[in-house]
Amino acid sequence: MNRLLIVGAGGQGKVVLDCAKLMKSFDEIHFLDDNKIGEEILGHPVIGKIADLESLRGDYQNAFVAIGNNSYRLQLIEEIEAMTYNVPILIHPTAIISEYAEIGSGTIILPGAILNAGCKVGKGVIVNTSALIEHDCYIGDGVHLSPTAKMGGEVTIGEKTWVCIGATIINRIKIGSNCLIAAGAVVIHDVLSKESVYGIPAKKKK
């Protein structure tokens, strides 16, 4: 029996559950969440805490981290992989993925997202609804691309950066790690690590 644990039973957990069920790859799906033990999330039980991952390894082959915090999500993925769980890639049936795209473990590709030829998407990335990753982009580990975020060709985004809803990044832009690209921003210049940018065109917050 191919069983999946979803780590985190909040809003992101619901999205992960929906995607995993539509893939029809798992026989059973259960949750772990420190604050919701005994509850049911869309009909699927929360069976324990995150700390129970190690003791459950014999009963579950797969574990997926459904936590919005980029740093914590990556940390948990590394811990889960060290326990020898399979950390799957989840792809919604309506996403369009080039056969020449590369995707890392623990990444989720949500409804209507497009990944074009030559793009590389790292580990533990959230590619949210209708996000666009054009050709030859590089998306680092733990990045969150919010709904309708759009990347032109050859964009580079460093690890754990958050690109908020509706942001646009023109081609060949380089964005560092741990950045915030605000909702609706249009990025036409490179962004250094740990910077936050807002507006059209996007500028660093003072």
Image: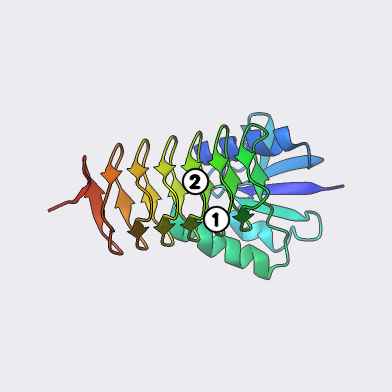
Q: Position of residue 128 (x, y in %)?
A: 50, 39
Q: Residue at x 69, y 39 (%)?
A: 20
Mark 1 neighbour class, 10 Å CA radius: few under 14, some 14 to 19, many 20 or more: many
Mark 2 neighbour class, 10 Å CA radius: few under 14, some 14 to 19, many 20 or more: many
* As drawn, 141 above or below 4: below
Is residue 11 or residue 90 the one in the foreground? 90
Q: Position of residue 83 (x, y in %)?
A: 70, 68
Q: Is residue 162 left or right of residue 29?
A: left
Colouring mode (rainbow / by chain / secondary structure / one colour): rainbow
The outermost residue toward the bottom is: 82
Q: Is residue 95 left or right of residue 136?
A: right
Instruction: Measure the alpha-carbon separation of dots 1 and 2.
Output: 9 Å
SS class, disc 2: strand
The outermost residue toward the top is: 42
Tag 1 and tag 2, C-beta contact below 8 Å? yes
Is residue 101 or residue 142 the one in the foreground? 101
Residue identifier under label 2: 133
Q: Position of residue 111 (x, y in %)?
A: 58, 33
Q: Residue at x 66, y 70 (%)?
A: 82
Is residue 115 or residue 76 the one in the foreground? 115
Q: Is residue 85 left or right of residue 8?
A: right
Sooner in the amino-acid sequence: mark 1 or mark 2:
1
In the drawing, what numbered circle is on residue 121?
A: 1
The amino acid beneath tag 1 is Val
The amino acid beneath tag 2 is Ile
Q: Quadrant of residue 191?
A: bottom left
